Amino acid sequence: MNRQELADLIFPNITKTIADYEAMYPERNLGENARVTRFAPSPTGFMHIGHFMPCLIDYVLARQSDGIFYLRNEDTDTSRTVEGAVEYIRSVLNTYGLNPDEYEYRDTDEVKGNYGPYIQSARKEIYHAFIKHLIIEGKAYPCFLTQEEMDVIREGQARDKRRIGIYGRYAKYRDLPVEEAIEKIKNGESYTIRLKSNGDFNRKFKFNDLANGEMEFPENDIDIPIMKSKDGLPTYHFAHLVDDHLMHTTHVVRGQEWISSIPVHYELFKTFGFKMPKYIHIPLILKKEGETIRKISKRLDPEAKMTYYEEKGYPTMAVIEAIMTIANSNYEAWREGHPDAHFTEFEFSPKKMSSSGALFDLDKLDNISKNYISHLTKEEVYDGVLAWSKVYDEDFSKILEKYKDYSMKIYNIEREQKKPRKDYTYYSEIKEKTWYMYDEYFDVAKADFSAYDGEDVKTILTQYKVIYNENDTMEEWFNKIKELCTELNYATDMKAYKSDPSQYKGSVVDVTNIIRIALTTLTTTPDLYSIMKLLGKTRILARFDKMIAK
């Protein structure tokens, strides 16, 4: 018996060869420097910041080189698949505008691109053709080790402080005669397919990583599994090889935790004689906690999950900007020099990545977000907070829709000026910073005049009602407040007040503050004159009356 018979027994329905598939997936017709990148998440959990950063880099690399950015669903680990994970990944890509050029969405039967299927579980026959080729070549074999036997091997290796894996004398079925392997399969014995490694652990090879430079590794000598027995699907490493070869991926962006798999991937590509993609192993995303810096955790840190930014209502571009600043050390300087440029115009360089880790700072994100929102138009702020509230605060969304023009005027206070106010960090914060502008939310009980004499407050509000004129300019408006101060013995000259405060009941600051509290219940707000212009005389007088009654 020969290896062809063994291969035909394992894969009786596989007739296509590697050459057939290479003809089906020819070289892409792209420019010489075009990069083909892929975002290839596994649907074993919901998307987090550790997924988002390499995805963003993939997108930038493809866009700045007139290349291709495609989405591949690596769902071969069926036992850990989480329902809804694939749909959420698509939602995140759409939300942040990182739309792939090629993709496949099973739930909508939508496919774009000529290099699919883009779902690994639908590519089983392709993988089998490549595995069949290895068996025929004597470079792969069926392994009949049971789980119990492998557990004993691992325990012994751990006890003896040896490398963990099936290699050397542990590879019990590596040289099993073909006829015996065929007999075992015909008898129904369970097996996996393993690569027959040709590596020598004591021999080193050099590998160039675009982010970390030249690195040196021992060759892989472990007979890694390349096809699982239970469902016939390939392992991650083998699917990675086949897909990146046929889809002509030029650059693979992934986390530093994958560096240890380089020897395996190097051997797989070498075994087939395929050209390897260029690899960019990006730094871990870190978080500072007190004096400690640690890896950001999906379990411990809510900001590790992409849902956190949606629930808070961070503008998508603010999140992108924050990630770009930790992805490349020169991004901030570039942004300062190109304030209106799209982030894809930045020339991303893997060499500008931090080798010690990317420190992600929420305070920095907040500052970026505040600055970003401050430069939006009132229409853009309104659209942003309305979209957020429709998902997370339905009652507020109805208020916004009811008072659309009025709301936009609120968001425009101190906006159209050289240095716009930076009141809003994210959209979920806007309601808590503007609620007092809406009668539906205004609550007299929230007003705290405890810092002032109650009778003085009543007197100020009562007399101010008489002199208030909604048509006054800002200068006229403030002059009337000062006139009221003089009449009631409140200092209008702060220097005089500070030199001898005992001569006055208070200052113009106190009078203005009492008016502010009466209208907003707060002591700190945007420009009071602008607020009053928006509230209008009827609403102002009504609020004064409620406060006087209180």
Image: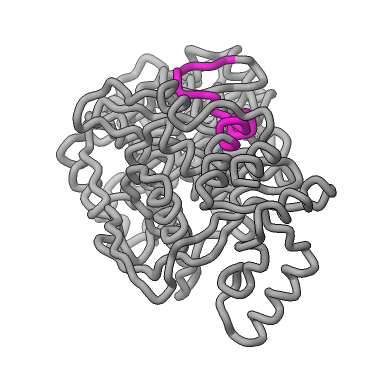
Q: Residue furthest bottom?
A: 160
Q: Residue furthest front?
A: 1
Q: Quadrant of the C terminus?
A: top right
The percent coordinates of residue 386 (x first, y second) are 55, 22
| Region of the chain picked out in magenta, as a range | 110-128
The percent coordinates of residue 439 (x first, y second) are 63, 23
Quarter where residue 30 is shown: top left
The percent coordinates of residue 62 (x first, y second) are 31, 32
Q: Is residue 539 above or below residue 39?
A: above
The percent coordinates of residue 505 (x first, y second) are 44, 52
The foreground one among 114 and 389 is: 114
Residue 186 shown in magenta: no
Inspect this view and state whether residue 520 appears: no
Residue at 61% x, 26% y is 389
Residue at 50% x, 30% y is 17
The foreground one among 256 and 271 is: 271
Residue at 49% x, 50% y is 50
How many marks the image carries: the answer is: 0
- Position of 299 with respect to 421 (left or right) is right
Quarter where residue 318 is shown: top left
Residue 112 shown in magenta: yes
- Position of 403 with respect to 468 (left or right) is right
Inspect this view and state whether residue 280 appears: yes
Quarter where residue 467 is shown: top left
The foreground one among 541 and 107 is: 107
